[in-house]
Image (cartoon, rainbow, N blue to C red):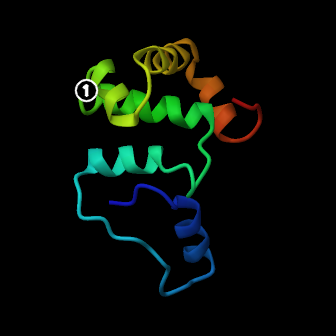
Amino acid sequence: MLLEGHQRVAAARLLKCATIEAQLWDCSFIKGLVRVLSDRQQRRWSVVEEAQLVRELVETHEHTNGKIARMLGKEVDWVNRCLAMVDEQDEAAWRAIQNGKISG
């Protein structure tokens, strides 16, 4: 499963590249998602992207706010703020942020 690098893959497809450099991790999707979100040296995540990933861990994988905080090395209040931000945004606003029309 591709966790990060979607733009690189899309660019490679447009350029009809047969191969692309990738890292393979032997771990679960959850551990991979936490690793990607925690690894600040690879990529700087926007506040919006962090909030969406936290929401993914809660909704799809049914983790508690406390468990997410521990996995990411964050405070529970940080997780709560991420979730509140996602809940307060409507779908049109999220699309505008994702398309770069407004900043998160």
Does 9 appear above or below 42? below
The residue carrying pointer 1 sits among few (fewer than 14), some (14 to 19) or many (20 or more) residues within 10 Å by Cα, namely: some
Q: Quadrant of the C terminus?
A: top right
Which residue is rendered at x = 76% and y = 31% of the image? 102
Name the quadrant containing residue 96: top right
Does 18 appear above or below 26? below
Residue 50 picture location, percent across and down: 52, 34
Residue 100 picture location, percent across and down: 73, 40
Which residue is rendered at x = 44% and y = 73% of the image? 22
Name the quadrant containing residue 62: top left
Does 97 appear above or below 41? above
Which residue is rendered at x = 32% and y = 60% of the image? 1
Residue 12 picture location, percent across and down: 57, 76
Between 17 and 24, the one nearer to me in the picture: 24
Residue 54 picture location, percent across and down: 42, 30
Q: How many marks?
A: 1
**Residue at the farthest bottom position:** 18
Between 86 and 80, the one nearer to me in the picture: 80
Q: Secondary structure at mark 1?
A: loop
Between 24 and 91, the one nearer to me in the picture: 24
Q: Is residue 14 left or right of residue 64?
A: right
Q: Is residue 58 left or right of residue 83?
A: left
Which residue is rendered at x = 55% and y = 17% of the image? 85
Q: Tag 1: residue type?
A: His
What residue is shown with label 1?
A: 63
Does 104 appear above or below 80? below
Q: Is residue 43 left or right of residue 60?
A: right
